[in-house]
Image (cartoon, rainbow, N blue to C red):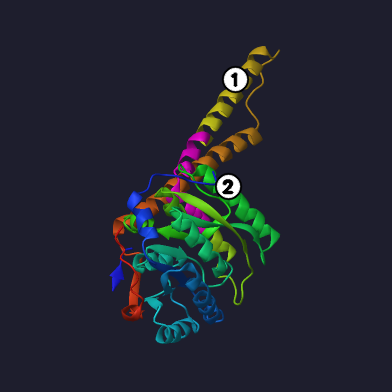
Amino acid sequence: MTQTGPEILACPWPASGSDRRRAGRGLLSVVIPCHNEEEVIAATHARLAAVLPATGMDFEIVYVDDGSRDGTLRGLEAIAAHDPRAVVIELARNFGQQAAMSAGLAAARGDAIVITDADLQDPPEVIPEMVRRWREGVDVAYGRRRHRDGETAFKLVTASLFHRLFASLIPYPMPVDTGDFKLIDRAVADAVNALPEKRRYLRSLVPWAGFRHEPVWYDRHARVAGTTKYSPWKLLKLAGDALVLSSDAPVRLTWVAAAGLGGIGIVSGSVALVGQLTAAAPQPGVSLAAVTAVVATVAAVQTAAVAIVGEYVVRAYREAQGRPTWVVRRTLGRERATTGSSRAA
C-alpha cells in the first residue's frame, strides 16, 4: 500500500475548533517515528501509557517503524498485541524521519496530534500541558527547550546558530530552539497533509500553515538508551534540505555576490585607471597574482551559483517524478484502536 504523502505566532482559526475542544473527551493521537530503537521502545510505551490518561482524552499511539534493522519491529508487534491503543505502521524500507513523521501524521485520527521521538529526550510528562494549551485555543503548542542534557557544547552552539539563521531566512514567523516535539490541532494536520510536495520538512511546514502557535517550555533530557541516528553528515544534509525546501534566500545570495563582485571590479578598474593616468611613467601590465585572485573569485562565485540552482533543480525534478513520500508495508492494531470523538470540526 502506498501513500503520498516572535514567541507567539498568531493567525485566525475557525471558531468551531474551540467548540470541538471543549466538547467531550476527544481523541489524542501521539505519532512516534522509530528507527533502531529496540533498547528504549518498551520504556517509551510504558511512560506514555502512564502519562496520557492525565490529559483527560481517549488516545491512540501511532508508531511508525522506519525500516529498523534491530528488534524494534518485534517490540512494536508485542506492544500492539497487548495494548489496543497502539497502532504500528511498518514502512517498506527506511524513508527517513521526515517521511516517517508524515506517514504517522497522515494516519493519525485524533482531534489533536502530538509528534515526538522514541528516545524519551522529549519527556512525555509535558504532553498534558500541551493539551491544556490546546483546550484554551492554541492550535500549535510547540516544545521550546530551556536546557539540553547529554549534548556537546559544539552541537548546542551550532544548533542555536542554525535555528536563528534559518528563522531569519524564512519569509514567515519561525520559532527557534525547537524540534519536532509539538501538539497540533486537527485543522493544522489536515492543512499540512493536504500539501502536495513529496520532500517534506515538518518544522517549516507547520509554521507555514499559520494558525495560533505558543511555546511550552521544558528541559530536554539525555537519551534513555541507544545512540543518536543523526551523524554530522545527516545533520548537515537535513540543514541543507531545510534551507532549500523552505527558503529562496540561497538563490538570492548569488545576486548579492554578483553585485559585490561587480562593485569590486568597478573600484579596481577605477583605481588602476587613475594610477595609470597620474603616474609619472605608465606602469605596464598587471601582476599575475592580481589576475589569479580575480579569476579565482569570479569562478568560485559562478560555481556556487550553479550549485545552488542545481539544488533547486534536483528538488523540482524529484517533485515532478511524483513518487510517494513513503510506502506502507502493513499496519497493525488499527482495528482495535480507541475510536474517540469525531474528527469533524
Give the number of marks: 2
* Residue 279 shows in the view: yes
* Residue 241 shows in the view: no
Q: Residue at x 43, y 54 (%)?
A: 139
Mark sitting earlier along the chain (1/2)? 2
Q: Residue at x 47, y 38 (%)?
A: 252
Q: Quadrant of residue 198?
A: bottom left
The answer to which of 74 and 252 lies nearer the viewer is 74
The amino acid marked with disc number 1 is Ser
The amino acid marked with disc number 2 is Arg
Q: Horizontal and vertical percent for residue 257?
A: 53, 36
Q: On the rendered structure, is 19 left or right of 157?
A: left
Q: Is residue 254 magenta?
A: yes
Q: Horizontal and vertical percent for residue 114?
A: 46, 64
- SS label for mark 1: helix
Q: On the rendered structure, is 207 left or right of 217?
A: left
The answer to which of 278 and 193 lies nearer the viewer is 193
Residue bearing the label numbered 1: 270
In the rendered view of the protein, which quadrant contains the C terminus? bottom left
Q: Residue at x 33, y 78 (%)?
A: 334
Q: Horizontal and vertical percent for residue 32?
A: 46, 70
Q: Horizontal and vertical percent for residue 154?
A: 68, 58
Residue bearing the label numbered 2: 164
Q: On the rendered structure, is 5 left or right of 95?
A: left
Closer to the camera: disc 1 or disc 2? 2
Q: Is residue 53 above or below residue 214?
A: below
Residue stretch rendered in magenta on the structure: 237-256
- SS label for mark 2: helix
